[in-house]
Image (cartoon, grey):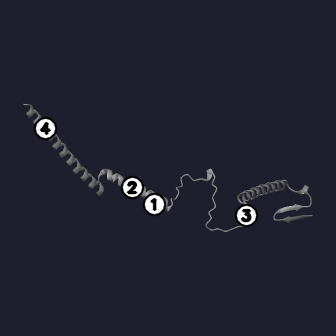
Amino acid sequence: MRYVFDDIAVAGTSASRPRTFKREEAEVKDEEEKFEEESEEELDQDSDKRKGTQGIIEIENPNLVKPKNLKARDIDIGKTTELSRREREELEKQKARERYMRLQEEGKTDQAKKDLERLALIRQQRAEAAKKREEEKAAKEQKKVEGRK
């Protein structure tokens, strides 16, 4: 007795089966074994993650972000990461501070101009004070010379 289902001949004895059918049967068994091994690994991973009452109580927390395990070969090196708002603001502050300090050194800011004016005034006053001291010193020496004569 011979039946035909989905273009596969099914016979009453295994002797009448074609050789390709045996190979296909072996491939299906291999695939089933692989699938069972993968499902066992997944179960092992789930049981490792759950400790204590976590295995009993399942909570749906929409705010909970599960860490994504990335393998080294899956990481895209060329991809740039997005900065958070705080990180972006911090970078902008640092750049603004550096820009201000550079302008300050060049003397282009209002504060730098005021500082330079004060510095110029102080230098002028010190130069005048130094001249006055030298004149007084010269006058004292001249008096000493005249007093000796």
Q: Earlier in the sequence, mark 3 or mark 4?
A: 3
**Do labels 1 and 2 touch, CB within 8 Å?**
no
| Residue under numbered circle 2 | 97
Cα separation between marks 1 and 3 = 41 Å
| Residue under numbered circle 4 | 140
Instruction: Specify the label residue 109 is tagged with.
Output: none
| Lateral position of residue 133 relative to residue 35, left or right | left
Cα separation between marks 1 and 2 = 12 Å
Residue 29, quarter of the rendered image: bottom right
Can see residue 109? no
* Badge 2 density bin: few <14, some 14–19, many ≥20, Cα 10 Å: few
- How many numbered tags mark residues here? 4
| Residue under numbered circle 3 | 53
The amino acid type, in three-letter code, at marker 2 is Arg
Q: Earlier in the sequence, mark 3 or mark 2?
A: 3
Cα separation between marks 4 and 2 = 54 Å
Query: At 90% from the left edge and 57% from the top edge, which residue is drawn?
Result: 16
Residue 70, quarter of the rendered image: bottom right
* Badge 3 density bin: few <14, some 14–19, many ≥20, Cα 10 Å: few
| Residue under numbered circle 1 | 89
The picture places residue 49, in percent across and down from the top left corner, at 70, 58
Q: Earlier in the sequence, mark 1 or mark 3?
A: 3
Return the residue found at the far top: 149
**Do labels 4 and 2 touch, CB within 8 Å?**
no
Mark 2: which secondary structure?
helix
**Mark 4 or mark 2, whichever is nearer to me:** 4
Query: At 62% from the left edge and 50% from the top edge, which residue is drawn?
Result: 72
